[in-house]
Image (cartoon, coloured by chain):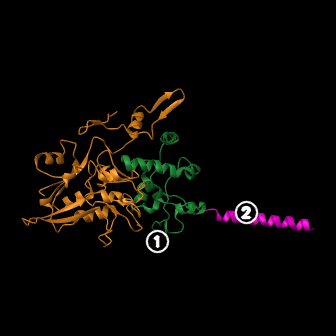
Chain colours: A orange, B green
């Protein structure tokens, strides 16, 4: 059995969650608690893919991101089945391109903006129902089964990365259920990540040849992304808020 | 004489009542894949519990190897329309609608989930080997804890 990893930042042991508990049960098939009382593990080989030892993140090289390229947005839209409805006030905000211009120097930059998968997510802090949550591997999600659509998280998000579904939706992608009355945001393509894949935006970005987006485990010192972060300067957006985003930008 | 007429009337009433009950019983479409090893009676009573249990594991813990997912429900129980494509829950004859209309229970699932399978999912499902008896028993025991 794998012991829960220690969280280095706060020196706080990760909780032994229910799944880990049952997993430990799965190792020995069944545990006899008392005569006649047996604890059975759920469904044999359990595979929870949210690994507490990992923290998924992204590094975006703004120099490599071209202003006229929209590949990441298109890929996300296709993967997750959302469409812009032409009204900027109600458009889905899974991912969008932002063009910036420095007032003094005139330098222009373009970058993709999406849920920053904060370590201390304000959206999770304010959620009254527990629908907004952070997985143990750092991915911030909305559990739409619990979401009541109060949109408090949208107010709390400093990045305007969440949006509300105003109209009934049909023909959703089976990997990305979404419906009227709930809040949604970038899921870091959690269905792909759980199967060992990379998010659709990252894949499409490298397919265009720009290669501006890098995805990986921030906690693994040998990963490409951790090496890049170690060797080159980068920043999280609104670092002053100390939410420690999992999405980091370089050359911004 | 009157007694005989009354008996006849009661008999006619009973038989029409029985016929009516039979005709309103839902016409449940056949599924594509292998039958549920737990039996249909078990699934009719417990399908929502199985799905609710597994949805939390998937959403919160990333468990993608769960046994009962709504994805598989709609794939295996897909009903083809006249154009040979699966019909949505909006249309008459959808598998879930058959019973839910009969029992007057609203389905919330399809406000977010697609009621139609994705392309190629049905073929994929046919290749999946059915669960062994041991797996099923372990699962059911887990459910009852």
The chain ID associated with circle 1 is B
Q: Position of residue A204 (x, y in %)?
A: 23, 60
Q: Position of residue B122 (x, y in %)?
A: 43, 58
Q: Is residue B137 above or below residue B2?
A: above
- Disc 1 and disc 2 in contact, CB within 8 angstroms: no
Q: Which mark is residue B18?
A: 2
Name the residue rendered at 82%, 64% in the picture: B10
Secondary structure predominantly adopted by residues drawn in magenta? helix
Give the structural element (helix, strand or loop) at label 2. helix
Stretch of the chain drawn in magenta: B1-27
Direction left: furthest residue = A105
Judged left or right of residue A192, residue B55 is: right
Closer mark to the observer between disc 1 and disc 2: 2
Q: How many marks?
A: 2
Judged left or right of residue A180, residue A59 is: left
Direction top: furthest residue = A35
Q: Is residue A139 above or below residue B82?
A: above
Q: Which callout, 1 or 2, points at the residue further toward the start of the chain?
A: 2
Name the residue rendered at 50%, 31% in the picture: A38
Quarter residue B4 falls in: bottom right
Name the residue rendered at 54%, 63% in the picture: B97
| Residue A56 sits inside the magenta stretch | no
- Graded by Cα atoms within 10 Å as few (under 14), some (14 to 19) or many (20 or more), the crowding at tag 2 reads few
Quarter residue A250 falls in: bottom left
Can residue A5 be seen by looking at this rendering? Answer: no
Q: Is residue A16 above or below residue A34?
A: below
Direction right: furthest residue = B1
- Graded by Cα atoms within 10 Å as few (under 14), some (14 to 19) or many (20 or more), the crowding at tag 1 reads few
Q: Which mark is residue B138?
A: none
Q: Which mark is residue B83?
A: 1
Q: Are marks 1 and 2 on the same chain?
A: yes
Can residue A223 be seen by looking at this rendering? Answer: yes
């Amino acid at each position: 059995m794998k012991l829960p990893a220690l969280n280095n930042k706060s020196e706080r042991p990760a909780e032994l969650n229910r799944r880990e508990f049952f997993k430990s049960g799965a190792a020995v098939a069944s545990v006899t608690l008392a005569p006649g009382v047996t604890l059975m593990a759920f469904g044999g080989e359990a595979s929870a893919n949210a690994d507490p030892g990992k923290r998924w993140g992204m590094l975006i090289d703004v120099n490599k991101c071209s202003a006229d390229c929209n590949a990441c947005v298109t890929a996300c839209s296709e993967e997750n089945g959302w469409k812009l409805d032409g009204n900027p006030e109600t458009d889905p905000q899974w991912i969008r391109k932002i063009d910036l211009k420095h007032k003094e120097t005139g330098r222009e930059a373009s970058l993709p903006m999406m849920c920053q998968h904060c370590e201390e997510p304000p959206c999770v802090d304010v959620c009254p129902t527990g629908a907004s949550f952070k997985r143990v591997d750092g991915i911030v999600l909305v559990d739409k089964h619990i979401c009541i659509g109060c949109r408090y998280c949208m107010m709390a998000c400093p990045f305007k990365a969440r949006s509300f579904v105003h109209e009934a939706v049909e023909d959703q992608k089976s990997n990305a259920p979404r419906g009227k009355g709930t809040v949604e945001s970038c899921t870091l393509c959690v269905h792909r990540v759980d199967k060992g894949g990379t998010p659709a935006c990252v894949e499409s970005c490298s397919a265009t040849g720009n290669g501006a987006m890098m995805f990986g485990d921030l906690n693994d010192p040998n990963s490409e992304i951790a090496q890049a972060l170690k060797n080159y300067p980068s920043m999280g957006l609104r670092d002053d808020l100390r939410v420690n985003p999992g999405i980091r930008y370089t050359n911004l | 004489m009157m007694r005989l007429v009354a008996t006849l009337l009661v008999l006619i009433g009973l038989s029409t009542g029985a016929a009516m009950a039979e005709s309103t019983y839902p016409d449940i479409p056949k599924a594509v894949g292998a039958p549920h090893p737990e039996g249909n009676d078990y699934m009719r009573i417990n399908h929502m519990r199985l799905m609710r249990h597994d949805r939390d594991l998937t959403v919160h813990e990333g468990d993608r190897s769960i046994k009962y997912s709504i994805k598989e429900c709609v794939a295996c129980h897909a009903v083809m329309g006249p154009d040979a494509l699966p019909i949505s829950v909006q249309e008459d004859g959808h598998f879930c609608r058959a019973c839910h209309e009969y029992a007057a229970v609203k389905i919330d699932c399809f406000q977010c989930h697609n009621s139609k399978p994705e392309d190629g999912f049905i073929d994929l499902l046919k290749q999946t080997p059915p669960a062994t008896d041991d797996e099923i028993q372990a699962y059911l025991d887990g459910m009852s804890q």
